[in-house]
Image: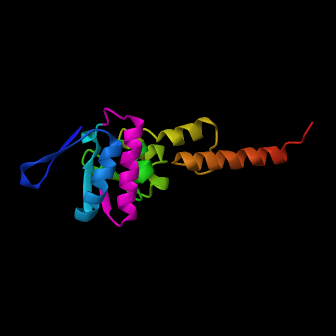
Amino acid sequence: MLNWPLPGGTSLHLVGGALAGIVLRPWLGELALVLVLVTQCLVFHDGGITALGYFLNLLKGLIEDGRTIIVATNDVNLASEIADYVHIISDGRIVGHGTPEDILTDAIVLKRARLDLPIIVEIWNSLGMVADKPPLRIRELVNKLGYFIKRQQVSTPGP
C-alpha cells in the first residue's frame, strides 16, 4: 500500500507492484534525475515476488532512461540484479568497491561487512564450479550451466 501526497491536497493510494510501476514510472521519469532508495523501507506485502519483479523492472527502466539510482541496501541479491558499481560499507568505512562481478563474488570482502554471497553465487559454488567466475544473475547461471552441460556431453563418450 502506498499513499503518495499530490498537489492540491489529494493523495495517491496504491496497492500492488504492478499498479505502482504503471503509475510511478512515468512520474519518476519526469521528476527524478537521481533517485535514492533505502531498501529497508521497501515492503512488498501484497505481491511478494511479483511486486518485487515489477519494482526491479521499474528501476531497470529508469536506469535505461538515463536516471541515476543510488540504493542503500544489505540485500546482495538485489544489488547483484541492478547495480553497475558497488560500495561495501562496514562500521562507516568502505571495505570494498568495484563492479558487482568483482565485489559481490568476493566472500572475504562481504564477510568483513557481515554479508553473505548472493544466492546465485552460493548455488554456483555449491555445484563445485570454482574454475570460472561465478554468475550473479539467474540468466547468467542458466547460460553457464547450459554451456557446461554441453561441454560435458561432448567430452563424455557414448555407450
Give the side of residue 81 with respect to residue 24, left or right.
Answer: right
Residue 47, picture quadrant? top left
User: In the image, residue 12 lies at what x, y percent?
Assistant: 18, 46
Q: Name which residue lies at 40% across and 51% down.
A: 57
Q: Is residue 152 above or below residue 96?
A: above
- Dividing the picture into quadrants, the one containing residue 63 is bottom left
Inspect the magenta stretch and tell me whether residue 70 lies in it. Answer: yes
Q: Is residue 113 above or below residue 23?
A: above
Residue 5 in view here: yes
Image quadrant holding the N terminus, namely top left
| Res. 96 visible in picture | no
Which residue appears at 37% of the width and 40% of the height? Answer: 51
Q: Which residues are magenta?
A: 44-71
Q: Residue furthest top?
A: 45
Task: Indicate the quadrant containing the C terminus: top left, top right, bottom left or bottom right.
Answer: top right
In reply to whether residue 27 is colored magenta, the answer given is no
Q: Nearer the viewer, residue 12 or 97?
A: 12
